[in-house]
Image (spheres, rainbow, N blue to C red):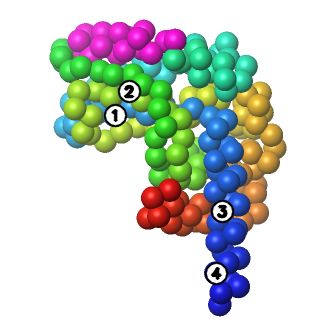
Amino acid sequence: MLLALATVLLWGAWTAHSQDALARKMIRLHVIANSDSEQDQVLKLQVRDIILDQATAILEEADNMAQAVQKLEQSLPDMESIAAKEINDRGYHYPVTARLEETEFPTKEYDGFRLPSGEYLALRIVIGEGAGKNWWCVVFPPLCTTAATDLGETAMAAGWNEKDVSFITEEDEGYVLKFRAVELWENLRQRLGK
């Protein structure tokens, strides 16, 4: 029994390490609405579209993660201004903040790939009180706007390898079990205070 527990813990740690390594190669976009009202949720999507267009244009010039981070950090004030203008143009007067920060995400399934839970660097756009439902995707590499058929090519152009791509797609054997191991490992880390 102890041997089985030790094996599960070691495998969970290895899988979580794979997730951590992958997380260091991506930036997620996280847009948080003011509230859950229908109007605020629509506004969130409108702001998302503007920010996604802006971030995509900025990150087209980034060849790697370090460049992507640098370009986004330099663009945060512009992104706040663009988001604030969109909010004002829609008749709202919410403040908005744009930050680049480590953020905890749950497991998320996208079209053609799935990301395990864990901590990821995120471009966070918080509208007003930021108390509403949120929206997220992967902005670097640009997986938000990539068709599932182009996923591997897009990710590898940003410095990923085949192992990284197979880790988030169903091509990797043990895909679901590995993600469950990451989730269990993350829960254990949170309980132990990381």
* Residue 143 seen in the figure: no
In the picture, which quadrant includes the N terminus? bottom right
Q: Kindly identify the residue that appears in the image at 53 percent across and 18 percent down.
A: 72
Question: Which numbered disc flags the more N-terminal residue, 3 or 4?
Answer: 4
Residue located beneath label 4 in the image: 5
Looking at the picture, does residue 101 appear above or below residue 21?
above
CB atoms of marks 2 and 4 within 8 Å: no
Q: Kindly identify the residue that appears in the image at 66 percent across and 62 percent down.
A: 13
Secondary structure beneath dot 1 equals: strand
CB atoms of marks 3 and 1 within 8 Å: no
Q: Does the magenta stretch include residue 75?
A: yes
Q: In this view, does 85 lie to the left or right of 135?
A: left
Q: Which of 150 and 47 is in front in this view?
A: 47
- Horizontal and vertical percent for residue 177? 64, 67
Residue located beneath label 2 in the image: 125
Q: Kindly identify the residue that appears in the image at 67 percent across and 43 percent down.
A: 22
Question: Which numbered disc flags the more N-terminal residue, 3 or 1?
Answer: 3
Residue type pointed to by label 4 = Leu
Badge number at residue 121: none
Residue type pointed to by label 2 = Ile
**Type of secondary structure dominating the magenta stretch:** helix
- Horizontal and vertical percent for residue 118? 53, 50
Q: Give the range drawn in magenta.
A: 74-90
Looking at the picture, does residue 95 appear above or below residue 35?
above
